Structures are given as structure tokens and as C-alpha cells.
Amino acid sequence: MDLVADTGRAAAGRRTMAWLAGGLTAAATAAGGWLAPPDEVQGQAQRLMYLHVPAAWVAYAAFAVVLTASGAYLIGGDLRWDRFARAGAEIGAALTAVAIATGSLWGKLVWGAWWAWDPRLVSTVLLLLAYAGYLALRRSLAERTGARDGGDHRVARPAAVVGMASFLLVPVVHFSVVWWRSLHQQATVLAPQRPPIDPRMGVALLLAVAAATLAALCVLLYRVVRLERRLTPDTPADRAPARVG
């Protein structure tokens, strides 16, 4: 089923996904707020992990959507892919801002500072600026050419190139804690050589990531549908001149 189709069946599918996302969010909130214990060193401040980490990981996924959709557009020329790229960039930029904000609060509670010139922090800000620039480029091109953003190749082609190039920052952000000295700890869940995470923390984190992923997918589909509605050509009746008398 085409979940971005403007049909009743597709709308029902999107609503079902939204209800599932809401259920997962409730479960993740309960697990992260009550089931999982506080961290032995960081105390209650560690619970920000259940918002900070999903925001960062799903932002990566959203930027992967931009990369994939932009490549698909450049190969096939289908403007629907360009609309997916725009929606993915909007979601990814918003979630990156959430990750920076929650990370700053977490740092204040644990390190005693809102900001540090840490490789992970600096590279994440650069990532946000790159995709904010991508969205600004789209708007600038649309205003300069009179094109409709999401419905014109004059916007889609240069935006696709910038969207794909911006993804190069994602592995820089992710591996910054390995390549340079960083205040951030390295991978815990996916690092077998490190002490294992408490199972209750692991369950809460996985639920939070699943909830954030499904919620972001719902927003992505909804945004693409909205863009396609906005870009739908006027009907012949709408274009016909009005009659007098």
C-alpha cells in the first residue's frame, strides 16, 4: 500500500502507524522514567539518554533518507523523491537541534558546563548547519526562480547534490569519539568489549529508539502528503475564467 497516497486507505494506514508510535512512546516513557534505574555515576541526569540518543540516531536515519532520496531523484528524475528528501532534511534538522539541546542540558548536569569544545559537539553543530543550509538553499532557489519547492527540477537538482554531500558529516559525527579525544563515552550497546549496559536500561533505550523511529516515519509520510497536496495542479474548473451574468 502506498502510504503517501491521498486516499482513505492510505490515511487509515498512517493513523494506525501514529497509534503504534503513541503506544511505543508511552511504553518508552514508563521504562525510561520508572523501570530503568538511575546511573551509578550520573544519577537521574542519565535519564536524558532516553531522549538524547533516540533523537541523534533518528536524525542519522532522516539524513540517510535525504541521501537515498536525492540519489534516487538524480537517477530517475522523479520529483516525489525530492519531496522525500526535503521532508527528511526537515525532520533530521529538528531532531539534531533536540539532540544538541538535550546534550547541552545533560552536560550542564554532569560536567557542570553547557558547552565544551568537544569533537562530538562541534561536529554535530556543523551537521545541523549543513542541513539548515540545505533547506535555506531550497527556499532561496524557489524564491529566485519562482519555482515551487518540491515540484520543480530547478530546485531539486542542486538541492540533491548538496543533500548528498552534507551526509559526509554523519560518519564524522558518529566516529568523532573514536577518532579524537572526547568527553563523550564510546559505544556501549554495540561494543562487546565494554561492560554491558543494565538490561533495564537497554530495554528502555531500545523502546525509545523504536518509538522515535516510528514517530519520525509518521511525520515523514504526513509531510510528503502535505507537500503533494500543496503541489497538486489546479483543476480545469479553477483555471477557467469567471463568467459575468
Image (cartoon, grey):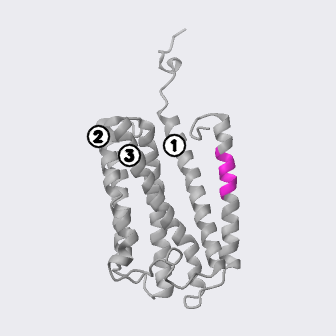
Name above or below for residue 233 compared with residue 13.
Answer: above
Q: Which residue is mark 1?
A: 224
* Residue 24 part of the magenta-drawn span: no
The CA span between labels 1 and 2 is 23 Å
Q: Quadrant of residue 4?
A: top right
Q: Position of residue 208 (x, y in %)?
A: 61, 67
Q: Which residue is mark 3?
A: 70
- Magenta span: predominant SS is helix
Q: Position of residue 114 (x, y in %)?
A: 43, 81
- Can you say which quadrant of the picture contains the N terminus? top right
Left or right placement of residue 7 versus residue 144 in this view: right
- The residue range painted magenta reads 14-21
The CA span between labels 3 and 2 is 21 Å
Q: Quadrant of residue 216?
A: bottom right
Q: Secondary structure at mark 3?
A: helix
Q: Residue at x 51, y 85 (%)?
A: 109
Sequence-first disc among 1 and 3: 3
Left or right placement of residue 112 versus residue 126 in this view: right
Q: Residue at x 69, y 55 (%)?
A: 20
The CA span between labels 1 and 3 is 14 Å
Q: Quadrant of residue 120?
A: bottom left
